[in-house]
């Protein structure tokens, strides 16, 4: 029986297909954890091996004379010293090479900074309770988190002062600590513009959801392209991430199907400044399997 020789065009197409899928990985994946007890323990999220960054959400009350409070939505109560398990899980995740950040702010808007001194006091609290400082009662015990994520949904005054003070504390640490931010994708009049203009932030994961004017659309990605370009050319940060909901149910708008992300969105954002994708949130990702679908490697 005569053997068939591979056609050169067929080999070219096969090589092109392999090359395409080898480039379709979404980069480093991050996820928010802490706002739904149904997502399971933090260690469960880290054991998946899918994420390089986990943001613990949220330190939702701080500033203006208020007692800072964590809201972990049913996981544990930091005020009653009941979050030591989370502290052990943080150390477990870190041993696996995963960076675990404290996310401050969130949608509750039970926070504000009344002055630069107020901002510095909040920074001192964060340093002593969650990072390299010392306190008799640390919510997560001996665990030292890897940095702070600014997820600020209301009020813009004095967050630059908060960033500067945290940066001063970071300079005293032997451990690399990160300053990250998750601004909404609308660049103009952004609440974090002042803080991000300090050039102190390592990573910026821009929220491309619940903001229809700059979300990704397969039919017309021009708004997304414009916003991404503005962020990556106007703000000085090491890496920029695309913030997305992990399912339709995770946000009002902005969900991007995995095939659209791989085939249409990633070619737009790939550059030396591109870091990956950060998902809201672990619970919805657990239900949808979104992170597995976009983490394609050959």
Image (cartoon, grey):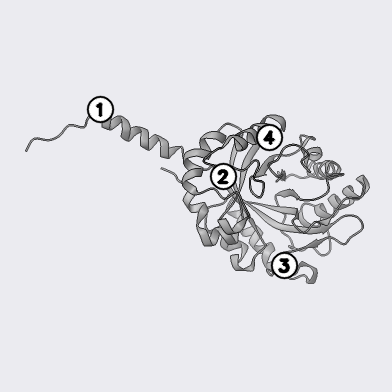
Measure the alpha-carbon separation of dots 2 and 3. Answer: 28 Å
Measure the alpha-carbon separation of dots 2 and 1. Answer: 36 Å
93, above or below 202, in the image: below
Write down the residue under mark 3: 83
Measure the alpha-carbon separation of dots 3 and 1. Answer: 61 Å
Q: Locate residue 264, reporting x and y percent.
A: 50, 38
Q: Are marks 3 and 1 in contact (CB under 8 Å)?
A: no
Q: Residues within 10 Å of mark 2 (few under 14, many from 20)?
A: some
Measure the alpha-carbon separation of dots 3 and 4. Answer: 36 Å
Q: Nearer the viewer, mark 3 or mark 1?
A: 1
Q: Residue at x 71, y 64 (%)?
A: 72
The numbered dot on residue 231 is 4
Residue 25 visible somewhere in the drawing: no
Q: Locate residue 52, reporting x and y percent.
A: 58, 49
The numbered dot on residue 8 is 1
Q: Residue at x 77, y 56 (%)?
A: 130
Q: Secondary structure at mark 3?
A: loop
Q: Locate residue 163, reporting x and y percent.
A: 81, 43
Q: Residues within 10 Å of mark 4 (few under 14, many from 20)?
A: some
Q: Locate residue 289, reporting x and y percent.
A: 50, 57
Q: Residue farthest to the top?
A: 8
Between discs 2 and 1, the one toward the N terminus: 1
């Amino acid at each position: 029986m005569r053997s068939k020789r591979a056609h050169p065009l067929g080999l070219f197409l096969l090589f092109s297909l392999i090359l395409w899928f080898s480039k379709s990985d979404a980069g480093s994946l991050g996820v928010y954890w802490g706002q739904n007890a149904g997502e399971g323990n933090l260690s469960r999220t880290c054991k998946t091996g899918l994420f390089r960054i986990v943001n613990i959400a949220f330190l939702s009350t701080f500033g203006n004379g208020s007692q800072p409070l964590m809201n972990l939505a049913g996981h544990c109560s930091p005020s009653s010293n009941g979050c030591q398990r989370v502290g052990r899980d943080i150390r477990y995740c870190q041993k696996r090479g995963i960076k675990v950040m404290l996310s401050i702010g969130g949608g509750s808007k039970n926070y504000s900074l009344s002055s630069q001194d107020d901002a510095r006091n909040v920074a001192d609290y964060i340093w002593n309770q969650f990072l390299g400082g010392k306190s008799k009662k640390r919510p997560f015990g001996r665990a030292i988190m890897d940095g702070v994520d600014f997820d600020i949904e209301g009020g813009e005054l004095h967050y630059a002062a908060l960033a500067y003070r945290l940066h001063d504390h970071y300079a005293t640490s032997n451990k690399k600590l990160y300053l990250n931010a998750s601004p909404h994708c609308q660049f103009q009049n952004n609440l974090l513009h002042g803080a991000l203009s300090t050039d102190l932030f390592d990573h910026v994961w821009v929220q491309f959801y619940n903001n229809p004017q700059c979300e990704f659309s397969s039919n017309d990605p021009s708004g997304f392209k414009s916003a991404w370009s503005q962020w990556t050319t106007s703000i000085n940060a090491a890496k920029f991430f695309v913030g997305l909901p992990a399912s339709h149910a995770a946000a009002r708008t902005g969900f991007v199907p995995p095939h659209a992300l791989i085939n249409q969105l990633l070619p737009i954002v790939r550059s030396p400044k591109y870091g990956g994708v950060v998902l809201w949130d672990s619970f919805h990702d657990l239900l949808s399997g979104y992170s597995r679908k976009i983490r394609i490697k050959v």
